[in-house]
Amino acid sequence: MTDDPLVALAERLQDICVLRGITVGTAESCTGGLIAHVLTEVPGSSGYFAGGIVSYSNAIKERDLGVAADVIARHGAVSAQTARAMATGARIRLGVDVAVSVTGIAGPGGGSDEKPVGLTYVGVADRDGVDVRRFAWTGDRTANKRSSAAAALTLLIERLEDDGE
């Protein structure tokens, strides 16, 4: 077991996925690949983790994840709708059983009254549909990225544990 709580979550996710033969992919924006990094910190992650797409720009969200330009235009890159489309796109494009997406404003700049620094949406898509959750972190950039990654891993674990019952 590790001292890093993110790696501990990755170990737990890996146990579930390997046991059940589930493949996972990621679509990350504000976390910049942190989730994929944490997953691959655990030896044996290639047994379930297929890969990820870091879609920091809207153009990559559209091109590589299939997020419709009008979704971003109407709702913004940081929105439940974009998180939903990112997760769905990653699941399809990576050919995995379940995909997680994260889009948010890590800070310290980039926020507004409507969408403050720390606002983050996490989505999980599987064969049963997509679940999106909204979070509002209050840390610095690194803390917000780590909180977002933890939320993504936790949501994946919850979704898979619920599905296994």
Image (spheres, grey):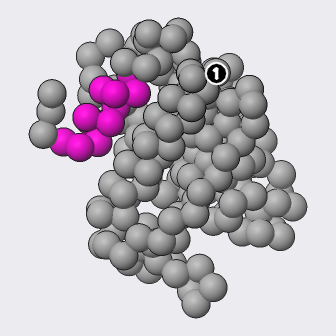
Type of secondary structure dominating the magenta stretch: helix
Spot occupied by residue 76 in the image (x, y as percentages of width and height):
72, 69
Query: 134 above or below 23?
Result: below
Q: Is residue 60 visible?
A: no
Q: In the image, is residue 134 part of the stretch drawn in magenta?
A: no
SS assignment at label 1: loop
Please identify the quarter of the rendering in which residue 101 is found: top right
**Residue lying at the far right of the rendered structure:** 70
At x 30%, y 72%, the residue is 140
**Residue lying at the far front of the rendered structure:** 165
Spot occupied by residue 4 in the image (x, y as percentages of width and height):
18, 42
* Segment colored magenta: 4-14
Q: In the image, is residue 7 part of the stretch drawn in magenta?
A: yes
Q: Which residue is mark 1?
A: 97
Please identify the quarter of the rendering in which residue 23 is found: top right
At x 57%, y 23%, the residue is 165
**Residue lying at the far bottom of the rendered structure:** 113
